[in-house]
Amino acid sequence: MKTLSFSTLIPIILSCYKKAIQAFICICVFNVSFAVAQSSNTNAKNGQQLSKIYCAMCHKFTGPEVLDKSTWKESVLPNMALRLGLKMSGKRLLLGSDAEENALLDSLNVYPKKPLIAKEDWNAIVEYYLTAAPEKMSKQSNTNYKEGTFPFGEQTITIDNANLPQITLLKYDTLGTELYIGDYKKLFALNTIGEISNEWALQDYAVDLDFSNTESPILMTIGKIVPSNKKLGQLSYLNKKENKRKSIEGFEELRRPVNMKKHDLNQDGKEDLIISSFGHTIGKLAWYDASDPIKEYVLNVNPGTRKVEVKDMDNDGKPDIVALMGQAYEGVDIYYNKGNNTFKKKRVLDFVPVYGLGYFELADFNGDGLYDLLISNGDNRDFSPIDKPYHGVRIYLNQGNDKFEESFFYPMYDCHKAMTHDFDNDGDLDIIAAALYSNYTSERTVEKAVVYLENDGNLNFTPSHMANPIHGNWLSMEILDFNNDGFDDVVLGAFLYDLNELMRVSKVTGLTSFAQVLLLTNTH
């Protein structure tokens, strides 16, 4: 894939790049307009064929079987209609009071003012989905698993008596042996004896930290946690001595950044910086030569990059980039390093958008020397917040030559994050996973919100759950040996979006106050 360099001809390239973003985001509009003309000429009225034309322009084609009839009818199809320029009775554009945000949506033609599809063609699509969709989704079943004993003790940690915990960051500094905790407009450093060793005031949510510079760690803040196209995120240096931070010039206007990684990609002896800007309807995955904001190389202008890892995936001696996409074209991409600051993209896993990819890790589960994929999918805060049987934890074993095959699936509603580690020190990789419930149902219960999956060495996993579960609103997770006993522990961060969600969770759980962090101490 040809990359964009900002090292020369900056004014010209910036202009071209801006136009490229707009063209890419609007590709759905232009392609759909072409599809309309084709449809009119051929008089194609088959709803299935039409849906494959229109739906697949902005994401992988999503068949009617993945959602129930009511969700299609009341939510997903009406919102799709709005994006095709159709005015739906009882439905309105997703516009708020933010004039700048609305102007961005308007400039990107997210909600076209003129219809891009003939009404009879749209009716055919609706008929197809409402005819083929199931009345109800099937339920998840874990009856094949025998319940084990949860190998962690539970301890809640309250930092500053926040009434509404909004932990967006848990990051452990292994050299400084401190746990960094981001709770909305505050960042805390907690030492291993439970004392707050540092505190910083923030303007918005912390989402990532880089400790490669031990004296001045780099902090990433997202700007707005809710969907947004505004450039409010930034990078800044933390000053440990004065409890201040300083913005990093050139990285002050990022579009909802969520992840960063430092690595010498071009092997020139200087650390490069990779930034994943999740965005909303527009986003960006880019790397910066020698961490210089002027030397930018753009890998992807799609929204939704959640996380990247850097590994030599093809064993050619050059570091490659593995990226998880959790919006629009959901899946996993590998950017193979071809030298001379160029990368070639290949999609290795592809998902429909309702799968809700949230997190991934690279790990060798079967000991064959190849990197496998651990993927958690369960982001359910969209137009279809129903119980989805395909949400959960998945392992894809690397067969070599870019081939990944699913070898394990553990069903788990709203699974937000799963991490792997040898928690019992027996030589194989176990898994800990947590849910961020969009709501509580008879299937999404407090008891099922955290699961430990113990590996017997042959990818046979035994699940276990907390003896005294608290609730199911865990956004962040980190692994660390908090008590320095040689066995790694787990910390979970609670996140409640607003007071309305707090009241809903309180009604279900009976809780009147919520701890910010849950420490799971390894009892192996």
Image (cartoon, rainbow, N blue to C red):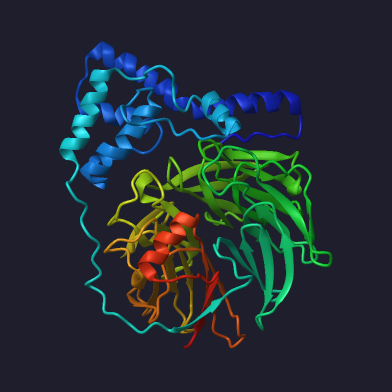
Q: Is residue 444 above or below residue 467?
A: above
**Residue drawn at the location 55% of the way across and 71% of the way down:** 517
User: Where on the picture, by quarter, is residue 20?
Assistant: top right
User: Where on the picture, by quarter, is residue 214?
Assistant: bottom right
Q: In the image, residue 523 lies at what x, y percent?
A: 48, 88
Instruction: Tell me if I can see residue 267 in this picture.
Output: no
Q: In the image, residue 407 lies at what x, y percent?
A: 33, 63
Q: In the image, residue 172 lies at what x, y percent?
A: 63, 70
**Residue drawn at the location 75% of the way across and 25% of the way down:** 11
- Closest to the observer: 145 or 237? 237
- Closest to the observer: 346 or 29? 29
Instruction: Tell me if I can see residue 518 in this picture.
Output: yes
- Relative to 236, 120 lies left or right: left
User: Where on the picture, by quarter, is residue 288?
Assistant: top right
- Closest to the observer: 218 or 268? 218
**Residue drawn at the location 61% of the way across and 58% of the way down:** 184
Q: How many marks?
A: 0
- Closest to the observer: 122 or 195? 195
Q: Quadrant of the N terminus?
A: top right
Q: Is residue 339 above or below residue 406?
A: above
**Residue drawn at the location 30% of the way across and 34% of the way down:** 77
Q: Is residue 217 above or below residue 113?
A: below
Q: Is residue 291 above or below residue 365?
A: above
Name of the residue lying farthest toward the top? 41
